[in-house]
Image (cartoon, rainbow, N blue to C red):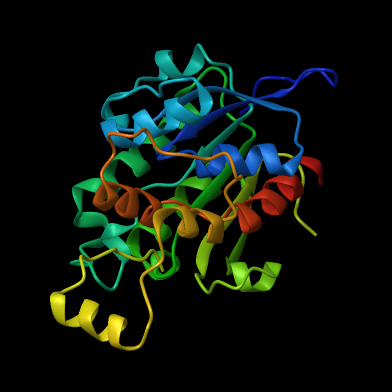
Amino acid sequence: MEGELKHEDEPFRLLEFYSGIGGMRFSLQQSGIRAKVVEAFDINNIANEVYKHNFGHSPYQGNIQSLTTAQLDKFRANAWLLSPPCQPYTRQGLQKDAEDARASSFMKILELIPLTLFPPTMLFVENVVGFESSITHKRMMDVLKKIGFITQEFILSPLQFCVPYSRPRYFCLVTLNNPFINAYNWRQASKDKVSLLQELDLRYFTPHEIANLHSFPEDFSFPSHVSPRQRYALLGNSLSVAVVAPLLKYLFTE
């Protein structure tokens, strides 16, 4: 299987799956990679509004599982960036793993790769710690190996990148050509917890402060109509730019 050839003076063409509020795209910008996101995909309309608010482009809104090879081929992307839903694997969730409907779209996308005329030559996968021991992970690795991809896996936290924030995540860097040398759920605080914080002269982080901990750029913002609860939920599903940017740079330059 051969992917679309990229001329040296051309930017990488990327597809961004499960794009959320744009954490992956911010990471691309921070990495300095010469790349163009030719399309982003997410089913969450609020997340897509935040994405458009910051990047001026509205992601394709729909079920990723319904995408066809013909639709994917028209983008002629060199790389796919995937940050699928983590709820099937989190300790706070039901841990239904591959039986969770939210896991099926991810496997469907991977299984389409060998059927495309212009398959990607690189993939970047991000998820919660726990994914690495899941049935979905095993199936992913089986599919990638069958296609001929080489993988390198990491568990990394912002703390390892000098950001005072402990949030370990799973990352998988995937390439066809060269061998490589805990999502949190925001829950509305009870009155008792709020009272305790006030007694201790403490408070919860604001959405802006959480975005800063994610290493989002200072000019990142939400549309005014997005509620605080929605902001916390969207940030809880996003990623650390400080961690992902160097990983993307490593994937695209090694």
- In front here: 65 or 169? 169
Q: Is residue 86 above or below residue 160?
A: above
Q: Residue at x 36, y 74 (%)?
A: 203
Q: Is residue 89 above or below residue 145?
A: below
Q: Position of residue 212 (x, y in %)?
A: 55, 56
Q: Position of residue 165 (x, y in %)?
A: 55, 71
Q: Tell me if I can see residue 94 in this picture.
A: yes
How many marks can you see?
Answer: 0
Which quarter of the figure has residue 17? top left
Q: Residue at x 19, y 47 (%)?
A: 101
Q: As drawn, which residue projects farthest toward the right?
A: 8
Q: Which of the image's four quarters has the N terminus?
A: top right
Q: Position of residue 99 (x, y in %)?
A: 19, 55
- In front here: 190 or 76? 190
Which quarter of the figure has residue 159? bottom right
Going by the image, does 191 lie left or right of 62? left
Q: Residue at x 15, y 74 (%)?
A: 190
Q: Is residue 144 above or below residue 180?
A: above
- In front here: 186 or 18? 186
Q: Tell me if I can see residue 148 in this picture.
A: no
Which quarter of the figure has residue 136? bottom left
Q: Residue at x 52, y 44 (%)?
A: 23
Q: Position of residue 163 (x, y in %)?
A: 64, 68
